[in-house]
């Protein structure tokens, strides 16, 4: 967390190359406080718009609050272009395969844990499709210490909505969740709908999982997206970020 005013503040943010799923070299945005640590770690799963400015800004916010955060480019194997162009390309392709995403997020977790400045604990977080990916990684790759699903669409889905990239709805694996979960949702969202969030919550209750959900009236998708005024909800965003930082403070310190 930020210290008192006389303390030195510094942050290092850079693009690195890590070995992702199947050992593939992929790019990742790695940001962390300057200094020896030890720092808790967070893996950020970017949203469908891609490996973009907002996602990297959010990663730096976590670094400012004392976390080493890494955000892999989940579209890296598709090529390189402007983030919005890569997001459109990924959407047209149906998104990266779930197995590959889980491998990339797991590799990112292991990268953080291998650093000399690590405290040994790593959470995973994401918004939109990244929220789905964060939950999927947490239930399929034991070893994360916390998971934040921020309005992840597709966590709950019908069997007929399955695709080659997304063959199984992540909610199916709820019984395998081994870490605490935070969920932040807008009650007017259409993906996930309020009913889908209810379904996920019932599954978490059924399996006795440690979770907390915060749901905001008058908010839809993209609550934190200050760059998208039609989506952004300032009061909910301020409160939601506070919830994220409090949750990680309790689970990763």
Image (cartoon, grey):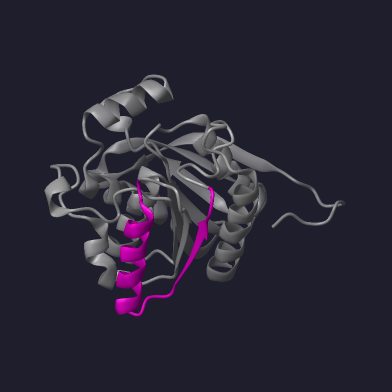
Residue at the (31%, 36%) spot, across then down: 25
Count the labels in the image: 0
Name the one closer to the observer, 226 or 177: 226
Residue 196 versus residue 97: which sits nearer the camera? 196
Residue 6 in view (yes/no):
yes
Q: Where in the figure is residue 185, as x and y percent of width and height? A: 46, 54
Q: Nearer the viewer, residue 195 or 25?
A: 195
Is the C terminus in the top left, top right, bottom left or bottom right quadrant? bottom right
Q: Is residue 218 left or right of residue 128?
A: right
Quadrant (top left/top right/bottom left/bottom right) for the N terminus = bottom right
- From the viewer's side, name the closer residue of 194 and 53: 194
Farthest-out residue, right? 6
* Residue 201 included in the magenta stretch of the image: yes
Q: Residue at x 24, y 65 (%)?
A: 173
Q: Position of residue 48 (x, y in %)?
A: 37, 36
- Residue 39 in view (yes/no): no
Which x, y percent locates residue 182? Answer: 47, 63
Above or below for 17 versus 141: above
Q: Measuring from the top left, give residue 193's x and y in whole percent.
A: 36, 52
Q: Is residue 156 depicted above or below 49 in this figure?
A: below
Q: Give, as a single range, the part of the protein colored magenta.
A: 191-218
Say left or right for 140 vs 31.
Answer: left
* Residue 110 falls inside the magenta stretch: no
């Amino acid at each position: 967390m930020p210290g008192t005013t006389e303390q030195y503040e510094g942050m290092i943010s850079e693009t690195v190359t890590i070995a992702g799923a199947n050992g593939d070299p992929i790019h990742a945005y790695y940001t962390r406080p300057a200094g020896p640590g030890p720092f808790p770690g967070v893996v950020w799963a970017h949203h469908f718009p891609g490996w973009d400015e907002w996602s990297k800004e959010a990663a730096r916010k976590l670094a400012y609050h004392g976390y080493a955060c890494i955000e892999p480019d989940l579209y890296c194997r598709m090529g390189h272009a402007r983030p919005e162009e890569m997001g459109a390309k990924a959407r047209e392709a149906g998104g990266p395969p779930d197995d590959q995403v889980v491998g990339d997020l797991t590799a990112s977790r292991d990268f953080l844990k291998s650093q000399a400045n690590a405290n040994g604990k790593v959470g995973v977080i994401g918004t939109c499709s990244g929220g789905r990916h964060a939950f999927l990684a947490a239930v399929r790759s034991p070893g994360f210490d916390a998971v934040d699903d921020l309005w992840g669409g597709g966590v709950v889905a019908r069997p007929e909505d399955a695709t080659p990239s997304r063959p199984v709805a992540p909610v199916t694996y709820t019984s395998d969740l081994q870490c605490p979960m935070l969920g932040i949702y807008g009650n007017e969202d259409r993906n996930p709908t309020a009913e889908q969030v209810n379904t996920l919550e019932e599954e978490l209750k059924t399996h006795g999982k440690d979770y907390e959900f915060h749901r905001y009236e008058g908010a839809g998708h993209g609550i934190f997206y200050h760059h998208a005024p039609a989506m952004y909800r300032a009061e909910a965003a301020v409160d939601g970020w506070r919830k994220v930082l409090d949750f990680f403070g309790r689970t990763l310190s």
